[in-house]
Image (cartoon, grey):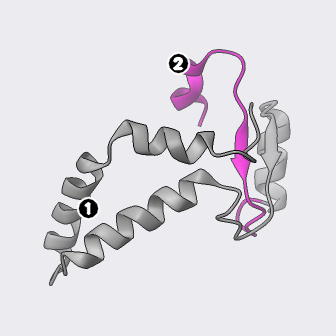
């Protein structure tokens, strides 16, 4: 996590949704020891998490193309991901009601 966040500078927040894997004692200790600022969200709340809506859109697009094997699924995921325009992602974030960090 630390390596991937270096380019973000000093002000970034890690979002988690209280999934049991994310709330284990080991993870909690690691986050505390590494001084990670955590923004906690309710579990399974796609209405609060733009990323969940993005994954849902990707799944819908891939499902519509009906992959028949794992290789094709992987290829279609990459193709459909490449088609999702950044403005679509921006609209998911800028919807009124989402917190501004």
Give the numbered dot on residue 77: 1
- Residue drawn at point x = 81 percent, y = 34 percent: 37
Residue placed farthest to the front in the image? 96
Residue extent of the magenta highlight: 1-22
**Please, what secondary structure does the residue beneath circle 1 have?**
helix
Position of the C terminus, as image quadrant, is top right
Q: In this view, does 15 lie above or below 77?
A: above
Q: Residues within 10 Å of mark 1 (few under 14, many from 20)?
A: some
- Residue drawn at point x = 63 percent, y = 15 percent: 9
The magenta stretch spans residue 37: no
Q: Give the number of callouts.
A: 2
Marks 1, 2: nearer the viewer? 1
Mark positioned earlier in the residue sequence (1 or 2) = 2
Q: Residues within 10 Å of mark 2 (few under 14, many from 20)?
A: few
Residue nearest the viewer, comparing 32 with 38: 38
- Residue drawn at point x = 78 percent, y = 41 percent: 31
Residue 19 falls in which quadrant of the image? bottom right
**Please, what secondary structure does the residue beneath circle 2 have?**
helix
Give how far across and how far down residue 100 sits, in percent: 74, 33
Give the numbered dot on residue 95: none
Residue nearest the viewer, comparing 83 with 14: 83
Q: Is residue 89 above or below residue 49?
A: above
- Residue drawn at point x = 18 percent, y = 79 percent: 67
Answer with left or right where residue 50 lies relative to residue 76.
Answer: right
Give how far across and how far down residue 76 sits, in percent: 19, 64
Give how far across and how far down residue 56 sits, in percent: 46, 67
Give the numbered dot on residue 7: 2
């Amino acid at each position: 996590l630390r390596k991937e966040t270096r380019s973000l500078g000093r002000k970034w927040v890690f979002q988690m949704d209280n999934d049991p894997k994310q709330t284990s004692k080991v993870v909690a200790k690691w986050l505390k020891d590494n001084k990670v600022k955590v923004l906690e969200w309710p579990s399974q709340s796609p209405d609060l998490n733009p990323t969940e809506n993005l994954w849902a859109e990707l799944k819908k697009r891939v499902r519509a193309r009906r992959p028949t094997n794992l290789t094709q699924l992987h290829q279609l995921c990459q193709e459909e991901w490449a088609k999702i325009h950044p403005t679509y992602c921006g609209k998911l974030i800028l919807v009124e009601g989402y917190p501004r960090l």
